[in-house]
Amino acid sequence: MKNAISFPLIKSLSMIVLLGALTTQCKQKSPKKAEPINDTNIEVPDGFSVELMAKDLGNLRHMTVSKNGEIYVNRSKLKDEKGIIHLRDTDNDGKIDMEQSFGNLPGTGILIKNDYLYTSSNSGVYRYKLNEKEEIIDIENPENIVDGLADKGRDNAKSFTMDDDANLYVTIGSWNDSCREEGTGNGIMPCAILDSAGGIWQFKANKLNQTFADGKRYATGVKNAVAIAWNYKTNSLFAAVHGRGAFHDFYPDHYTAKHSAELPAETLYELHDGDDAGWPYIYYDQFKKKKMLAPEYGGDGAITAGENAIDPIMAFPAHLAPNDLLFYTGNMFPEKYKHGAFVAFHGQSPELKKGYFVAFVPFKDGEPNGNWEVFADNFSGIDLANPSGPIEHRPCGLAQGPDGELYVSDDLNGSIYKITY
């Protein structure tokens, strides 16, 4: 394979969780043991188990888990006129037996932090006050943190994360894939979209009723970072970014359909105040391991550029669509996973003929340490090289449970999975 980013095989990806099998090995809050109801063939490394915790919940996006193991998930589309779902195991038998929906705005981001449940719509962020059990006190009256962020209907997810200093970091993705003038192959110069989108903005998490003008552009040149996370070990912001789309439509003299299928890389960045990742003027070629000048701005596939733009710390194949990022801090998984990054991909790579999986990036001393690998595979339920039916599930959200479990949400058929070791 010519890809500069290797795609190592995971040994013994043969763990298939069957209906009714008693697979969970995690600590239970009572002597009862959960009976997994997994009806898929998700593959995980030896020693890991998968349970289907819930299904048919709508278009699930990001999620967060309370200290008591209660799950809150945001939806990109309303279901029964509600945007957020709260799931609870009331009798501690390892099975979800209570569902409660609330909120009337669709969105993506959601996070429990500092006694509040923070959640986002497609234009802002709001929060619900929690009690000492991390239960919402007033479910009908959330507080508005920030509103009025750009929402043009495309790449409008307002993913967010927070640090320990009450700073809120919000993605504002670009609705224009490569900042082109409409109907042409010409790039807008300078790209005015960067004034209000294509980056990550910083707001105060404890200040109510902010507008876009109250925020600070923390990092720019970030086309659409649906996967965003604060790394508390490095005390810094990380984002896995959706790359731009086709090259060959307007530039067939320089790019083929194969180029469009395999370029550019999906990229993982560590971002600091004032950083510029280069979009739309450049893209990252994972085969050449170089930043290249975008064709809208005079590139031909051979011209490098972006001297002032930061380099990605990891590159993935094109079109995998990273939709969530989680740094694992639990003690349940083996030591190799501690402080490493899980990435949920809800797209597929034409180059690899693979997709719809959760990947793992090992970290050491705050930096990637070796190649990324597939961790949980086959959410699609079909052979993507020779597809025989529709995609069944697409991983979207990731959350860590109180015992170190890894939860995965599905934005296609509304399933939630729990992975334990």
Image (cartoon, rainbow, N blue to C red):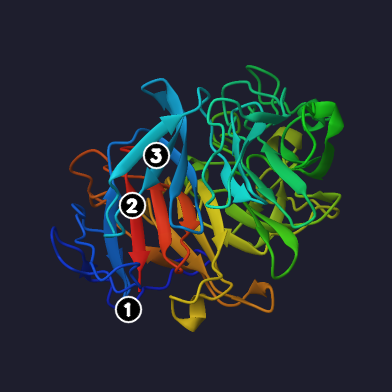
Q: Is residue 59 above or below residue 419?
A: above
Q: Earlier in the sequence, mark 1 or mark 3?
A: 1
Image x and y of residue 346, in percent: 43, 46
Determine whether, in the image, residue 193 is placed left or right of residue 224.
Answer: right
Quadrant for residue 235, please give it: bottom right
Image x and y of residue 362, in percent: 55, 74
Residue identified by numbered label 3: 411
Which secondary structure lies at badge 3? loop
Q: Is residue 262 above or below residue 172?
A: below
Residues at circles 1 and 3 in contact by the CB criterion of under 8 Å: no
Callout 2 amino acid: Asp
Callout 1 amino acid: Lys
Residues at circles 2 and 1 in contact by the CB criterion of under 8 Å: no
Foreground: disc 1 or disc 3? 3
User: Between residues 175 and 406, which one lies in front from this camera angle?
Assistant: 406
Per the model, the C-alpha gap separating discs 2 and 3 is: 22 Å
Image x and y of residue 255, in percent: 56, 41
Residue 68 in view in this figure? yes
Q: Is residue 351 above or below residue 193?
A: below
Q: Earlier in the sequence, mark 2 or mark 3?
A: 2
Residue identified by numbered label 2: 89
Q: Quadrant of the N terminus?
A: bottom left
Instruction: Give me the residue at 69% from left, 73% from top.
Output: 366
Residue 174 in view in this figure? no
Which secondary structure lies at badge 2? loop
User: Between residues 259 and 340, which one lies in front from this camera angle?
Assistant: 340
